[in-house]
Amino acid sequence: MKRQRGEGKIGCIVSLLVFGTLAAAGYKAIPVYYSDSELVDACDFIASSAAKKPIETIEREVRDKAKELGIPEVLMDKNAIRVGKSGSGEAGTCTITLRYKRTIDFYGTYQWTKETNKRISKPIFENIG
């Protein structure tokens, strides 16, 4: 009976190493995914309320939100944000296209490039109510 005592130690240590590695990777990756998701949600809201705003104002609002979320790739690349309005009369569409890449450095051992390529289109109604 004394021989069987403690045989689970190696499995426990391996499990702790695996969980520790996953936690460390999550610590680096989750903030990047979260900030990208928040920027897409903010662009959805900005596009919804773009009725009487010029394109430059919409683009500035998106860049300000990216700066607030700490996404430097959007601020550095001029082609990362594209804003367009289409339609005539009282209705149209506001389209915001986000296209940029972010690199996640996993403690100098591995680098992962996350690509964001989103197109948000919302209808514009100017004379409602």
Image (cartoon, rainbow, N blue to C red):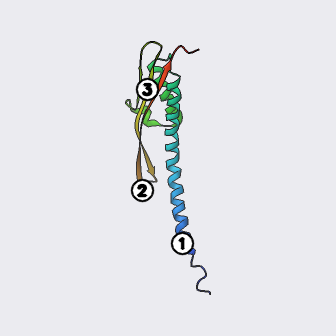
Q: Position of residue 72 (x, y in %)?
A: 45, 36
Q: CA distance from mark 2 to mark 3?
A: 39 Å
In this figure, which residue is indicated by the disc labeled 3? 95
- Crowd tier of the residue under label 3, counting other residues whose Cα lies within 10 Å: few below 14, some 14–19, many 20 or above: many
Question: What amino acid is labelled 1 in the image?
Answer: Gly
Q: What amino acid is found at the position of numbered circle 2 in the picture?
A: Thr
Q: Pointers 1 and 3 in contact (CB under 8 A)?
A: no
Mark 2–mark 1 distance (CA, rounded to whole Å): 25 Å
Disc with the residue nearer the chain's start (1 vs 3): 1
Residue at (50, 30) in percent of width and height: 43
Instruction: Tell me the element at label 2.
Output: loop
Q: Residue at x 44, y 47 (%)?
A: 104
Judging by the rendered image, the residue that carries numbered circle 2 is 109
2 or 1: mark nearer the eye: 1
Kind of residue indicated by mark 3: Thr
In the rendered image, which quarter contains the C terminus?
A: top right
